[in-house]
Every structure is written in C-alpha cells, then in structure tokens.
Image (spheres, helix red, strand yellow):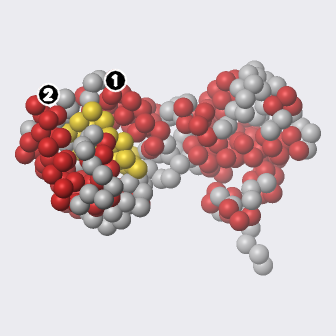
Amino acid sequence: MDLAYWGFSRWPFQRQQAADSSIVGASHEEGLARLLFLVDEHRRCGLLSGATGTGKTCLFRRAASYARRQGKWCLEIDATGLDADELAWRMADQLLADCSSNMTPGRCWTLIQQQLANQALIGQPVVAVIDNLDHAERGSSLAIRRMMNLAESSGAELTVLIAARGQLPDSSLSAEIELSVELTGWSQEETSRFVTTSLRAAGTTIEIFSADAIIVVQEITQGNPKSVIQVCDLSLMAAMSDDRHHVDAQVVEAATAEFAPRRSTPDFVRARQPALS
C-alpha cells in the first residue's frame, strides 16, 4: 500500500489494528460489561453470540485479559474442529497439568480434576474462555459440562464463557447458561465514528470518506464490523487506483463491485450483484 499517497503513518484498516479499537458500538460496550460481570461475580456460565464478524473474539480477548488482571487463572481455547478428547487435553494443558500428547482421555480428566482441586485449595478462581464452540465437533459441549461438574465437586470457582454464532445445539449445556449476550452490527453513527477514528489514528485529519460514502458503506455491510473494515479497505484502494484523494459513494460502489476477488467475493458484495438474465 502507498502510505505516502494518503499521508498515512500506517494502513488504517488492517485487521489487528481494527480489532484493537473495534468496541465502538453500544452492543459491544454492553456485551463487554456483561462478560466482566460474569467474571467478577464468579457466575457458572455465559454465552456470547453474534454473526461472523461482529467482534466476539475481540471481546473474549478483553475479557480474558481482564480476568488475568483480577488474579484469576484463565484458559483461552479456540474450539474450532476440536472433539471432546481434544478439548479436554487443551483444558488440562492450560491448567498446567503434567500432560503429554499421547495421554489417554481418562488420565487427562484425572489431571483436570486434580488441578481444579488445587485451585480450590489456594482460592484462585478459574475462567475458561471457549471461542467458536459452534465450530467444534460433536461431544465438545459434554466435555465443558464435565469440567463444570468437576469444578463444583472439588469446590473450585469456575466461570465458563462460550462464544458461538447462535444458540447452542446442546440443550443440556444451554441450561447451564446464566447470562446470554448477543452482539449486533454498528449503527451508521458508530460506523462513521469508527472510520474517522481509524483514519486519524493512521495520521490524517482529512475527511477522506464523504458522508454519502459512509451511508453506502452502512447499507452494504449492515454495520458488521468485519465487513465495514473490508469495504473501507477496498474503497481506499479503488480511490487510489483512480488517482482520487477522497472516497465518495460512487467509489464505494465501484470498489465492492470490481475490486473484491471473484473467488472469495464477500457475502455483502454477492448480495448486491444483479442476477444474470
């Protein structure tokens, strides 16, 4: 990217930079507050839901960081593709149990029980942050319930935070949830604020995106944070390729229609492409 063309010190819409500042919406602020409430009050289980790209992983990182600052032992696990045995091994590993890669599931659970009992003895609460549970293999929910039951029997204070795109398919685990948080997209005002803040953080005070450009960005993305980042990124590249120094509605429309790679065209672009007659 040509940073000098825009006068940027860095590219404003890189994914990690956006994730670090993505809590700009009321839904996200409220969601984080509820997660921290679960951690502070040592509640049993909470669910964070929302569509792909709404910022669940970002909120979980912040909740985990907060838990550690409060002196709690924190497990952070991405459950994508994990079956029950693999999830149990990850939990044991992050509890600092003496586990090896070829350990049997039974031995793994014994170590988890021992470590939870140790945490109870020293009075240190445990927070398990489990992301993408809806992408895990069947049986993983049972592993989570088993860990919760072991914590209860050993006297350990355990809070489990689960993230998924929607409601959990396992009704028995759903029954354990004390507080459910659903993330939604940004409002147009929040999207505008995110774009302005990102551009200023990149080193420019120029209003590169016009008001009508923001309206189109919002219409295309419906305020989905990940999609907003993609559309704004594409729009800057489109404007630069056309030797423009401002992004208006026409540039945004052209960017989403022409600059998105055809093989991985985002859903928000496909939905706006006219059907062939």
Q: Quadrant of residue 215?
A: top right
Place of residue 271 in the rendered image (x, y in percent of width and height, measured from the top left): 65, 62
Secondary-structure class at tag 2: helix
Q: Could you tell me how far apart the alpha carbons at marks 1 and 2 are, in whole angstroms?
A: 17 Å
Secondary-structure class at tag 1: helix
Place of residue 123 in the rendered image (x, y in percent of width and height, measured from the top left): 14, 28
Q: Is residue 100 above or below residue 4?
A: below
Left or right: 96 in relation to 156: right
Query: Which residue is disc 2 drawn over?
Result: 122
Tell me if label 1 and label 2 are in contact, CB under 8 Å: no
Asked whether residue 43 appears in the rendered view, the answer is no
Left or right: 205 in relation to 224: right
Amino acid, disc 1:
Arg
Amino acid, disc 2:
Ile
Place of residue 173 in the rendered image (x, y in percent of width and height, measured from the top left): 22, 56
Query: Which residue is disc 1 drawn over?
Result: 69
Packing grade of label 2 (10 A; few <14, some 14-19, many >=20) is: few
Q: Residue furthest bottom?
A: 277
